[in-house]
Amino acid sequence: MALSFSAKLMRGVSRCAALVTPKTAPTSCRYFSSAENSRVLVNLNDKTGVATMQLNRPPVNSLNLEVLTDMTIALDKLQTEKDCRGMILTSSSPGIFCAGLDIMEMYNPQEDRLREFWRTLQELWKMMYGSRLATIAAINGHSPAGGCLLSLTCDYRIMAQGKFTIGLNETLLGIVAPFWFQDTMVNTVGHRETERALQLGLLYSGENALKVGLIDELVSPEKVMETAEGQMQMWLKIPDFARQLTKEQLRGPTVQKLAQHQEADIDHFVNFITKKAIQKSLEMYLNMLKQKKK
Ligand SMILES: CCCCC/C=C/C(=O)SCCNC(=O)CCNC(=O)[C@H](O)C(C)(C)COP(=O)(O)OP(=O)(O)OC[C@H]1O[C@@H](n2cnc3c(N)ncnc32)[C@H](O)[C@@H]1OP(=O)(O)O
């Protein structure tokens, strides 16, 4: 019998999210670590109640089914830790925050896996966007497409200065950002800027992202984490219930919209991505990525 998503999540939690304290860990830090979930590195500081989740899938932290599953399991686990109040999302590879969805999941896909991949992304998005935790994205490198989406689910974004870019560039791949990607962007930068950004597949420099409000701060790469930690302290000064209810009022309707159309969105995604013309566009984009290296 097929397991529901939440049943899979629970199975995953008991399987891999045990809290382990390595000998070298500071006593206030608990690490969620096991060979199985090392694609995301998570630790929770018991003194501050702040967790750090690092994407850890070199070379570019592209999001495949396994990474998305591990993130979902880790976030679920953190949210059930009553002392955990905030989370900083970052990458273990300075220079690359996240290259977005793993294009190989969408190129020549097996339908069952493709469906599971998309459902897991939907679930992660709903959990992140509606999280009870205060969430801050410490964007320490490039953040296109799904990487930008992940950062947009957070409450605050800090990006590293440099030649890094961020944006929902799906149209450059010949694909279309679904309505809930668009909604998240509209809620952040407004309708007009989203129209321009999504149609043109804009990848913003840090300076331009700051101008349009896609990020909240632009700091030198070595200051990204300490800025995130400082900002988190401000968010945690607010009583949790007041902050959480306010977030729920603002974001709840957007989350509900996807929840109500989730199955139709999966059908639409599978139907769209498996079209010959779309497969051709993905192939050309993958070739372009490879050519860029030569
Ligand atoms: C209805 C449909 C909706 C679908 C919504 C889709 C959302 C998405 O997120 S689609 C993915 C969009 N992502 C991108 O456009 C980013 C593509 N990548 C890049 O631009 C760059 O890789 C970079 C700026 C993120 C990093 O550049 P650099 O450090 O120079 O690294 P390389 O380009 O050499 O990449 C190394 C290696 O990784 C492969 N790769 C990069 N991104 C992806 C990806 N998203 N998925 C799969 N593979 C990726 C790249 O091809 C290289 O592979 P090798 O040549 O085999 O080493």
Image: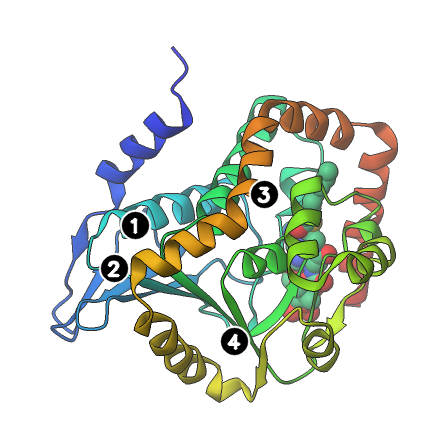
Which amino acid, by three-letter code, is at mark 1?
Gln
- Element carrying mark 4: loop
Residue assigned mark 1: 79
Q: Which badge, 2 or 1, comes first in the chain's sequence?
A: 1
Which amino acid, by three-letter code, is at mark 4?
Pro
Q: Residue at x 75, y 32 (%)?
A: 273
Residue assigned mark 4: 94
Q: Are marks 3 and 2 in contact (CB under 8 Å)?
A: no
Please state the quadrant of the image where ligand 1 appears. bottom right
- Element carrying mark 2: loop
Spot the residue most to the top. 1
Q: Could you say which is closer to the camera, residue 99 or residue 262?
A: 262
Q: Position of residue 60 (x, y in %)?
A: 58, 62
Sort mark 4 into few (<14), some (14-19) or many (20+) by Cα contacts within 10 Å: some
Residue assigned mark 3: 254
Q: Which badge, 3 or 2, comes first in the chain's sequence?
A: 2
Sort mark 1 into few (<14), some (14-19) or many (20+) by Cα contacts within 10 Å: some
Q: Residue at x 76, y 66 (%)?
A: 203
